[in-house]
Image (cartoon, grey):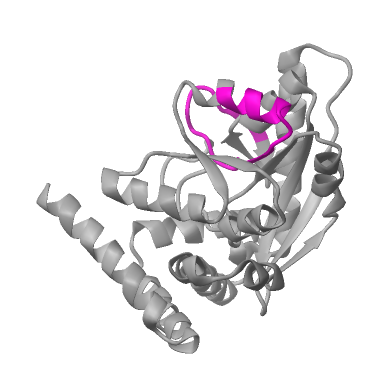
Amino acid sequence: MVKDFLIVRAYFFGWAIVRLLPEKHAYALFEFISKYFAKKNGNSVQRLRDNLSRVSPNISTEELEDLVQRALSSYMRYWCDTFRSPDWSKQSIQDRVACTNEEYITGPMKRGEGVIVALPHAGNWDLAGAYFASMGLALVTVAERLKPEALFQRFLEHRESLGMEVLPLDNRAMGTLVQRARQGKLIALVADRDLSASGIGVNFFGGQASMPAGPALLAIRTGVALVTAFVSYTDKGIHIDLKEISIPESGTDQEKLQLVVQKCADNFALGIAKHPEDWHMLQRIWIDEKILRSQ
């Protein structure tokens, strides 16, 4: 209980202080933190290094270390954005975002049809969601319950303040998502890691990974359009690259599911290969390795 209290207090204190700092100083502080974590080289940083070595296998040791530092800088930029974004206006949010193939989302939604977006942990996916919510689109997402509970509620409030409906990740989430998709909502789901029994095995950068079935399953069940999004950082803010995913017309649902999840994985890989520094994957993702190779 004491540990939970201290964690919550630390996050809440940081949330308040970072919003008061001038922008330049706030981001400089988080860049300093990124260098501290790189030097400390804890398990999460070692895992990040291991993951990046899989997606960029032909770079030198020095280039890999530089990539790790840039990835940590990107990750800390995400957190600084998160702390400061409650003070951003709709116009400020829109000014920070550029989007390729935006019509893949806005087109169907103007016709009253839902859209499902699958995306990896890259760039600032919260800002991407806030961008579409700022356009008046009804956006729904799912959040894994964090501990302590007070911290989870704070992040829930943060995403709701950006205009999102946030569903807790539980057994009822899929049924609600089906309803929301059929109601013409925009469903955004982070979908690049799932080591549960329900994950779908995919080929990912030449190895076997497991990714969530949720976005593909929703699209197959509802007939709603499915797109992937890769979010990368720019000097000004973020860039969102949208790609359409077609659902096979023939085959069993399981065969369709396998094909669609693999297509999503392939699109994620294209974005990660171009912007590996913006892929914030500090956990194990490949199921064909059991230990950190960097240890």
Query: Image height check: is 276 above or below 266?
Result: below
Which residue is at 45% across, 66% downward?
79
Residue 253 to residue 275: above or below: above
- In the shown orientation, is residue 153 left or right of residue 179? left
Q: Nearer the viewer, residue 58 or 155?
A: 155
Q: Position of residue 249 (x, y in %)?
A: 89, 19
In front of the other: 208 or 100? 100
- Let me know if residue 190 appears in the view: no
Quadrant the C terminus occupies: bottom left
Q: Is residue 17 left or right of residue 195?
A: left
Of residue 216 and residue 259, the one placed in the foreground of this image is 216
Question: Residue 45 vs residue 191: left or right?
Answer: left
Is residue 215 inside the magenta stretch? Answer: no
| Rendered residue at 54%/68% (across/down) | 71
Residue 154 on image: x %, y %? 36, 52
* Residue at image coords 61%, 57%: 130
| Residue 236, position as x, y percentages in the image | 67, 78
Query: Vertically, is 184 above or below 23?
Result: above
Viewer can see residue 150: yes
| Front residue of 255 and 176 | 176
Horizontal placement of 285 versus 47: left or right? right
Residue at 60 percent across and 43 percent down: it is 192
Magenta segment boundaries in residue numbering: 176-202
